[in-house]
């Protein structure tokens, strides 16, 4: 994020760090609210499957839309607002896929969570390096943000088609 703000809006890197810190603070707060809402839905009779699909949909579709909005930002403040919205809404996925692992396979949740975390970490490493190459090749962040949005939308579609909140038999 600091490189984005420095490259696109010519913000000093010390100031860019501030623009980059706000979204993560909002993520912590919104994630807490998403967890409370998720619990309320389940206590109110909404199925675990539907609850996880709602949370994950907000956690993927919301950031996808916000990143599209980010491509039109004309100032660092507006860009920070779009990024804050994207990262804040992304925290809904903590009440989606992240807790879903424990519900569908409690006996194997440690192994499955480790596998999911490893896959996510590898994707983050490759994505960070790939983003740098992509931006250098294309000359702007716009295309990368649009591709990221598309991936969010496709992941939400995949999740809503194939996910479940019911216990899966791995025996």
Image (tube, rainbow, N blue to C red):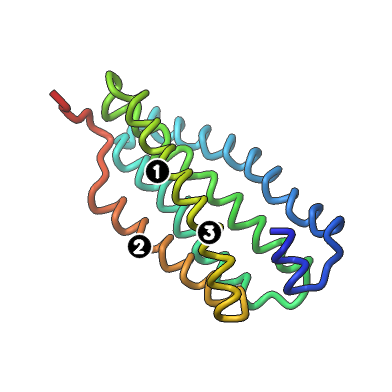
Q: CA distance from mark 1 to mark 3?
A: 20 Å
| x and y, in percent, of residue 18 in the image | 81, 53
Tell which of 41 and 19 is nearer to you.
19
| x and y, in percent, of residue 86 in the image | 59, 57
| x and y, in percent, of residue 164 in the image | 25, 40
Which mark is on residue 119? 1
Tell which of 158 and 166 is nearer to you.
158
- Disc with the residue nearer the chain's start (1 vs 2): 1
Residue shown at the point (40%, 63%) measured from the top left: 153
Which mark is on residue 60? none
Q: SS at mark 1?
A: helix
- Disc with the residue nearer the chain's start (1 vs 3): 3
- Disc with the residue nearer the chain's start (2 vs 3): 3
Q: Quadrant of residue 74?
A: bottom right
Q: CA distance from mark 1 to mark 2?
A: 17 Å
Residue shown at the point (43%, 37%) measured from the top left: 117
Give the foreground label among 1 and 3: 1
Q: SS at mark 3?
A: helix
Residue topped by disc 3: 63
Residue topped by disc 2: 154
Give the quarter of the figure containing the N terminus.
Answer: bottom right
């Amino acid at each position: 994020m600091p490189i984005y703000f420095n490259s696109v809006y010519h913000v000093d890197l010390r100031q860019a760090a501030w623009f980059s810190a706000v979204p993560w603070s909002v993520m912590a707060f919104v994630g807490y609210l998403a967890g409370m809402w998720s619990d309320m839905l389940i206590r109110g009779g909404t199925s675990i499957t539907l609850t996880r699909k709602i949370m994950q949909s907000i956690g993927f579709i919301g950031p996808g839309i916000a990143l599209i909005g980010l491509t039109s930002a004309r100032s660092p403040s507006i860009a920070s607002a779009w990024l804050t919205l994207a990262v804040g809404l992304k925290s809904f996925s903590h009440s989606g896929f992240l807790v879903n692992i424990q519900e569908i396979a409690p006996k194997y949740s440690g192994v499955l969570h480790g596998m999911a975390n490893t896959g996510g970490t590898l994707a983050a490493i490759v994505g960070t390096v790939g983003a740098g190459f992509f931006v250098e090749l294309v000359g702007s962040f716009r295309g990368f943000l649009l591709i990221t949005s598309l991936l969010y939308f496709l992941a939400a579609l995949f999740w809503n088609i194939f996910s479940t909140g019911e216990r899966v038999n791995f025996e």
